[in-house]
Image (spheres, rainbow, N blue to C red):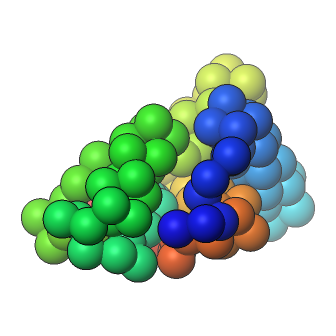
């Protein structure tokens, strides 16, 4: 797990939230016209661990994911729900649109992928 050694967790978190907010804002402005319209749903980020949890690399990988705010899911993946909350907080308005929530999740996943995680933005309709 050489790629995780020396990661600045605080900086990664900042980048994750900044990219999620930027992509969410852009989608709301460009596709929704600043209004909460169309289908509602939920978005989250899923990370698939690369190593088994009982190995040295696996323990370290899971420790980093927990420090980034992820929780283990029922299927042994790690998830972070509500990656769009900072965007909505900055706007002062909550959006239920599933697509803007997915864009925020994809924004976070992009940052995580760039540092070596198998990360994906996911969503579902409400």
Q: Residue at x 62, y 53 (%)?
A: 5
Name the residue rendered at 70%, 38% in the picture.
Answer: 8
Q: Does 63 sit above or below residue 109?
A: above
Please tell me which residue lies in front, 66 or 22: 66
Q: Position of residue 21 (x, y in %)?
A: 74, 43
Residue 110 visible in the shown view: no
Answer left or right for 116 relative to 42: right
Query: Where is residue 93 shown, x and y percent of the image?
Result: 62, 28
Who's the residue at 40% across and 53% down the image? Answer: 60
Split into 4 quadrants, where in the image is the C terminus? bottom left
With 126 as the anchor, is 61 left or right in this view?
A: right
Tell me: residue 90, above or below residue 26.
Answer: above
Left or right: residue 113 compared with residue 41: right
**46 or 88, which is in the foreground?**
46
Coordinates of residue 120 in the picture (x, y in percent): 52, 74
Give the quadrant of residue 61: bottom left
Toward the viewer: 59 or 67?
Answer: 59
Point out the residue furthest to the left here: 74
Report which quarter residue 79 is drawn in: bottom left
Question: Residue 92: percent from the left, percent from the top?
Answer: 67, 21
Q: Is residue 90 above or below residue 16?
A: above
């Amino acid at each position: 797990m050489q790629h995780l050694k020396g990661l600045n967790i605080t900086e990664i978190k900042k980048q994750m939230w900044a990219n999620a907010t930027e992509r969410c804002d852009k989608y709301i402005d460009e596709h929704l016209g600043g209004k909460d319209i169309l289908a509602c749903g939920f978005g989250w980020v899923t990370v698939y661990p690369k190593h088994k949890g009982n190995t040295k690399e696996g323990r370290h990988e899971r420790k980093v994911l927990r420090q980034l705010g992820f929780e283990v899911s029922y299927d042994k993946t790690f998830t972070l729900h509500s990656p769009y909350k900072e965007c909505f907080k900055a706007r002062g308005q909550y959006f239920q649109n599933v697509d803007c929530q997915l864009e925020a999740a994809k924004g976070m996943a992009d940052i995580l992928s760039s540092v070596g995680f198998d990360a994906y933005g996911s969503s579902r309709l409400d």
